[in-house]
Image (cartoon, grey):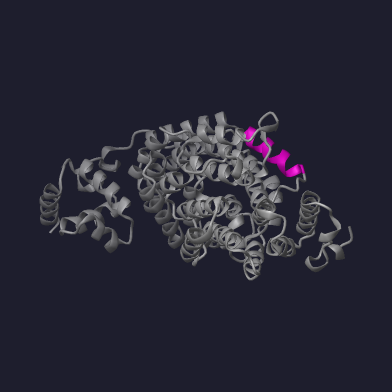
Amino acid sequence: MSESSLDAGTFPADDFADAEQQRRALFAAADQLRLAGRGTEALRVLAAEIAERRHGDHHRAQVLGQLAQIAAREQPSIALAGLWEALDRGLDDRSRSTLLAIVAAIAARTGHPDADALLRDAGTAHAAAGDHSSARHLALGRAARSLSHGDLPGADAVLAALDPDARVARRDATAIRAERVLVHLGLGRHQDARSATASDGTTSPGIPVSGRLAALDCLRMVAVGELPEAGALAATALGSDSTDLGPEVRALLVAVTAEVRYRRGEHDAARAVLRPCLRERRWPDSTTWTPAFCVAVRDPALSEPARLLDRAVADLHRSVRSLLPVPHFGPRLVRAAMAVGDTQAARRVTELVELVATRTPVPLWHALAAQTRGLLDGDADALRSAVDGLRTTAARPALADALLDLANSQRPRPAEAWDAAQEAAALYARIGAPGDQATADRRCVELAATPRHRPSTDEPPRTGFGALTPAEERVAEVLAAGATKKEAAGTLFVSFHTVDTQLRSIYHKLGIHNRMQLVRAWDRHKARIG
């Protein structure tokens, strides 16, 4: 078929005797346009067919499903432009309802400022004339909005009502499963995520049919420390040249490949994978590559790592979606920001992690919030809390990183720091991260040259006001003055979760149990120091 015959106005629709033949040719033409880099035209071809209103509801539903799949494989900017153009055509109410829901879902995924308004419009259109298709895409949009705001339980509740195995949902089954996998990963339910990716079937042992599910399974492996397996699967998927790999899938596979290589100490190979992907991209397309930025910020040898950090933080403020599947991404961004002296970026990421922890109150996110706060404030107690919390999860790389953070902190005694570094090195060895293991081993050597037991006058106090971190002392002062925890959070520009966590630590260190005792203890402390 010539290129000119692929254009919307010249598609030879009347050359086919029946709807099935016509549909096959239509889909083939749209796929060729997409592969030729003409995604907007591919969507235009399909929208024009829908607007013709021929061959009945089954044909319309099939074409709508193909349009949704092509939109999912395109950059967000191309998908949104093509869908907005399609909405300007003379569509029937049911088709318009579905397209509005697809637009709203893409907007919610990328943190579009009009996402809430678009979801309301899509909901109104569905209530007036929608069908099963618009209902599914509207639910996916609402789940995406919850994910972009860090509300994993909310997304879980919305997706629970969708059955990807239902006959009417077959075309959207992968999208539904993929969102469920992302929710499982964010909640720390890694075994459920593994089962959900495997339920799509396999082409060969361990490799899901869908590229998107394969990429999410790679993220699961990275999250739990199955690094050799993640690297092998990502390399296989990237090397397959599959037409199923849209920008989002490719970006995730690149992030996984580079992450594994960095942890193995293969820095040059990781840079070779990342560099072609780090060019300037404008929002919303930049959100597709945020996971790769979260990997790249660990490497100061890459050009302008501070600029990569700024781009990642800016997009995460629109949507925290990229932080959800891999637990150690949030602490890594804080660590990178502190390394370049950008405390503002470190604070912004810490607040985002704490926001997710507030909206998703599970041990994994409580631990991550403590870790990011510990890195920001230099608070060894927060890092200890993070280590304790991460021990209850399957996130072994995150635990190893938190142990190394504790070993690098200035507050622990040398013996405690050495133990943490040694445990981190052993854990890195178990997950197949010899590069990180070497870093932890070097820290062990440094600490071994330090006296294991300093004089008691040099040891930081473990109880009393002297044991409070600067951040805890500020919280104690504001609360002792009569502020509520919510008011203290606003005054100190931190989250409610941070104030609540620090208050528990304050009570423990001061040996008290309620606010009245805190007021009395603070008054005595102020009187002693004059």
Indicate whether 345 appears above or below 170.
below
Q: Give the mark count.
A: 0
Q: Is residue 502 above or below residue 363?
A: below
Could you say which is closer to the camera, residue 392 or residue 464? 392
Q: Position of residue 475 (x, y in %)?
A: 25, 55
- On the image, the x and y values in percent for residue 183 come to 49, 43
Q: Quadrant of the N terminus?
A: bottom right
Q: Quadrant of the C terminus?
A: bottom left
Q: Which residues are magenta?
A: 228-240
Kindly report the secondary structure that dominates the magenta region of the rendered protein.
Answer: helix
- Quarter of the image for residue 463 reads top left
Is 235 covered by the magenta stretch? yes
Q: Is residue 288 left or right of residue 117?
A: right
Q: Position of residue 217 (x, y in %)?
A: 60, 38
Instruction: Please tell me which residue is depicted at 33% across the width and 37% down the height of the picture.
Output: 454
Is residue 140 in sight in this rendering?
yes
Front position in the image: 400 or 235: 235
Residue 438 visible in the picture:
no
Q: Residue at x 35, y 38 (%)?
A: 413
Is 414 or 393 nearer to us in this picture?
393
Q: Is residue 379 above or below residue 106?
A: above
- Residue 169, image x and y in percent? 59, 44
Q: Determine if the magenta segment contains residue 124.
A: no
